[in-house]
Image (cartoon, rainbow, N blue to C red):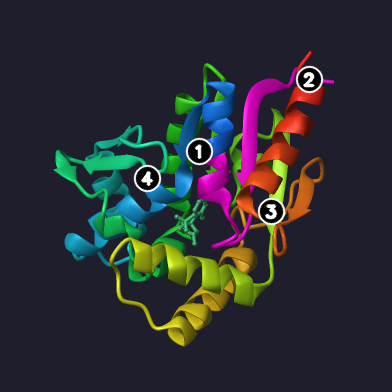
């Protein structure tokens, strides 16, 4: 059997608690948090701003070749990672529900997946990272030592996302957001390339009736038990 690497992967649909848990688990282990969704969001907005025809693979490919994407650790413990694309700070504009929908659309483009998967694998080369997304346990880091797949009821996920966006000062219609989340998850699950799915060797946790600290404790127990 091939050697497993010191990497934690946390995959699952939106609003399931991945970001908060990834940050907490990374802080507890002293690992780096890798937010792969932020990368898809940043690429999506970049392509939109340049008005690139998303069906034109060649145009998308040449934009990607000229794109410099940098990730920065969050300023505060509960903050999002910072993202700078070609010198422009897009950290907050990528966090809207619309940017999430666009990211989902763009994430099905083969050239985008290839480029971002390679970047993520380079960022994870030294190990000691907690990666979150849709395909981190299946495609990006299949040799990760600890893999988690989080799930929760759609209504609960929508409720959490509404609370998160409102606390960040964004106005949201909860019914509209629920419909957006349902569509995004369906599209992420049904795409051909690297769809959202549980890795065979991932541990599933249903977070519907658990609070963040309970899930975090559970994940750290699993990790610590296999650490020595
Ligand atoms: O985790 P997030 O909401 O920031 O992700 C935004 C979109 O990016 C998500 O709907 C699908 C895409 N994505 C992906 O395809 N693969 C990943 N590893 C992470 C995100």
- Residue at which label 3 appears: 150
Figure quadrant of the C terminus: top right
* Rendered position, 20 above or below 45: above
Q: Magenta includes 162?
A: no
Q: CA distance from mark 2 to mark 3?
A: 25 Å
Q: Are marks 1 and 3 in contact (CB under 8 Å)?
A: no
Numbered label attached to residue 80: 4
Q: Is residue 134 left or right of residue 151?
A: left
- Residue at which label 2 appears: 2
Task: Pinpoint residue 117: horizontal percent, then vertical percent.
Answer: 49, 39
For numbered disc 2, what is the local secondary structure? loop
Q: CA distance from mark 2 to mark 4?
A: 34 Å
Q: CA distance from mark 1 to mark 4?
A: 9 Å
Task: Pinpoint residue 208: horizontal percent, then vertical percent.
Answer: 70, 64
Q: Are marks 1 and 4 in contact (CB under 8 Å)?
A: no
Q: Earlier in the sequence, mark 2 or mark 3?
A: 2
- The quadrant in which residue 145 appears is top right
Q: Foreground mark, 2 or 3?
A: 3
Q: Magenta includes 21?
A: yes
User: Which stretch did the figure color magenta?
Assistant: 1-22
Q: CA distance from mark 2 to mark 1?
A: 28 Å
Q: CA distance from mark 1 to mark 3?
A: 15 Å
Depth check, front residue: 208 or 86 = 208
User: Which residue, as the protein is rendered here, is positioned at the far top?
Assistant: 228
Numbered label attached to residue 23: 1
For numbered disc 4, what is the local secondary structure? loop
């Amino acid at each position: 059997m091939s050697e497993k690497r010191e990497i934690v992967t946390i995959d699952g649909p939106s609003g399931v608690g991945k970001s908060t848990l990834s940050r907490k688990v990374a802080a507890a282990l002293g690992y780096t948090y890798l937010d792969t969704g932020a990368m898809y969001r940043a690429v999506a907005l970049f392509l939109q701003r340049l008005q690139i025809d998303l069906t034109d693979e060649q145009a998308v490919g040449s934009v990607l070749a000229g794109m410099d994407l940098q990730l920065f650790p969050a300023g505060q413990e509960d903050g999002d990672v910072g993202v700078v694309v070609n010198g422009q700070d897009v950290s907050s504009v990528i966090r809207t529900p619309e940017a999430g929908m666009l990211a989902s659309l763009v994430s099905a483009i083969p050239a985008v997946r290839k480029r971002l998967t390679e970047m993520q694998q380079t960022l994870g080369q030294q190990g000691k990272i907690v990666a979150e997304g849709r395909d981190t346990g299946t495609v990006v880091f299949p040799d990760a030592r600890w893999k988690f797949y989080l799930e929760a009821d759609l209504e609960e996920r929508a409720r959490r996302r509404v609370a998160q966006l409102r606390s960040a000062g964004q106005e949201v219609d909860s019914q509209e957001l629920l419909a957006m989340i349902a569509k995004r998850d369906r599209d992420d699950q049904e795409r051909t390339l690297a769809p959202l799915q549980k890795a065979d060797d991932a541990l599933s946790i249903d977070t519907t009736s658990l609070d963040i600290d309970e899930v975090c404790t559970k994940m750290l127990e699993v990790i610590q038990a296999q650490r020595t």
